Image (cartoon, rainbow, N blue to C red):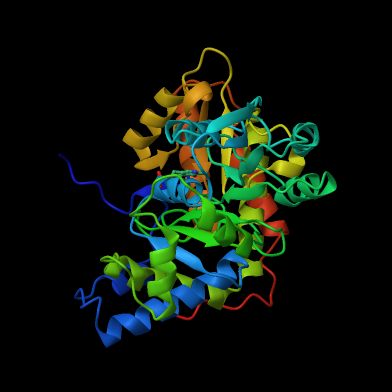
Amino acid sequence: MTHRAGRHFLQIPGPTNVPDRVLRAIDRPTIDHRGPDFNRLARDVLDGLKPIFGARGPVIIYPASGTGAWEAALVNTLSPGDRVLMCETGQFASLWRTLATRLGLSVEFIAGDWRRGADAEAIEARLAADKAHDIKAVCVVHNETSTGAVTRVPLVRQAIDRVGHPALLMVDTISSLGSIAYKHDEWGVDVTVAGSQKGLMLPPGLSFNAISNKAIAASRSAALPRSYWSWDEMLNANKAGWFPYTPATNLLYGLREAISMLMEEGLDNVFARHDRHAEATRRAVRAWGLEVLCAEPREYSSSLTAVVLPEGHDADRVRALILEHFDLSLGTGLGKVAGRVFRIGHLGDFNDLTLAGTLCGVEMGLGLAGVPVVKEGVRAALDYLAEARRPASLPRAVA
Ligand SMILES: *Cc1c(COP(=O)(O)O)cnc(C)c1O
C-alpha cells in the first residue's frame, strides 16, 4: 500500500464526510447508560431532533442502519397481510418493498421509470378506487438516493386527503433529512424514517422514526411481531430519558454535536446551501454535455446528482479511474441504472471548495476515461457559485 497524501474525497450520497467537531464529540469515554450524565445526553438528543424533523411528537432512536428504521415503521403499525401502497421511484423504494413483502405485507407497487418522484395522481387514483379502505399505508421515499429525484410529499398528502382515505403516510427521509426541507407535522406524515450517515453528518449506525399520534394509535392494534423495534417500550423509557436496551452512546455524543451544528447554521441556510451546490453541479453536468438522470426539474435532488453517461461508456470504470487517480469516491449506479450512471453526493459537511474539488476530479476522470465531454463543467459551476454568492447574513460557523 502506498500512502495517499491529503484528504480522501468521500462524495458518495452517504455515508457522508463526518466533520471534525462530530469526530471529537464521539471520541470520549463510553459512560453508564443508566447514569445521570447519560440522562442529560439522552434528553438533549431526543428534544434536539424534533425541530430537525419538524415534529412536535416523539422521535425514536435505534442503534441500527436506516434499514432497521424501515422495518420498525412497518412492524409497529401494520398487521400480517395488510395492503400497502408503494411507488417505484428507484432502488431504495424497491428495497423497502422487498422488506415489506418479506414481513408478510401485501405490497402494491406503482411502476415508475426511475427518473422522477412518486406520482401523486397515481396514488390518488389508486386510493379513490379502494372504497373498502383495504390499503393501510402509503410509503414513499422523499429523496430517492439511487436517482436523485425528490417526491413532493405535500402533493402525496393532498392526494390522500382529497379522497378522504385513512391510510397512514410513511416517508423515508434517510438521504434528505438535514439537507432538503422537510416538515413531518406540517405535511401530515405519520412515520418519518431517517438515518445518521447522510445529512446528519454522523457515521452509520443510528436510525430514526418520527411518529404521529395516528401512528401511535395504529401501533396499539398492529399485529406484526416485534420486540427489538417495539415503539411502546422505547417511548416509555424515553419519557424519562432512558432506553430499554443499550443505546449507541458515543454516536449520541456525535448526534448532539451535529444537531448543534445544524442549528448554528440555521436549517433554512443549510437547505439553501444544498440547493445552491446542487444547481452548480447540474450546470457542470450540462456544460460537459451529459444528462442529469432526474427528468423533472421540480424534483431535482439537492443532496445528490445522478449523471447519465453516453451509450458505450461504463460509469463504474469512470468511478474506478477517478478513485485511483484522485482519491475521490463517487456513488455507483444501483439496480436498473447500474453501469449507466454515477452519483455525485453534495450533502452534509460540504462547501464551495469541496464542490469545486469534487467537480475537478470528475472532469479530469471523464477525460481520462475517454468519455466525450466539453471540459467546461467546472467553469460553469464556478461561475454559478460566484454569481449566486452566500447571503451576507449567513452566520459564520462557531468553531
Ligand atoms: C441509504 C438509504 C437507505 C438505506 O439505509 P441503510 O443505512 O443503508 O440501511 C434507505 N433509503 C434511502 C433513501 C437511503 O438513501
**Relative height, residue 98 to residue 17 (above, below):** above
Nearest the eye: 56 or 387 = 56
Q: Quadrant of ligand 1?
A: top left
Residue pictured at 50% horizontal, 66% vertical: 59
**Relative height, residue 43 to residue 129 (above, below):** below
Q: How many marks?
A: 0
Q: Position of residue 345 (x, y in %)?
A: 50, 45
Residue pictured at 46% horizontal, 58% vertical: 208
Q: Position of residue 263 (x, y in %)?
A: 55, 75
Left or right, residue 247 beside residue 308: left
Left or right, residue 214 beside residue 237: right
Q: Position of residue 122 (x, y in %)?
A: 76, 32
* Residue found farthest to the top: 312
Nearest the eye: 201 or 292 = 201
Any part of residue 246 in sight: yes
Residue pictured at 55% horizontal, 30% vertical: 106
Nearest the eye: 68 or 117 = 68
Q: Position of residue 353 (x, y in %)?
A: 51, 57
Position of the N terminus, as image quadrant, is: top left
* Residue found farthest to the bottom: 36
**Relative height, residue 204 to residue 59 (above, below):** above
Left or right, residue 196 beside residue 264: left
Nearest the eye: 280 or 63 = 63
Left or right, residue 289 beside residue 177: right
Position of the C terminus, as image quadrant, is: bottom left
**Relative height, residue 42 to residue 330 (above, below):** below
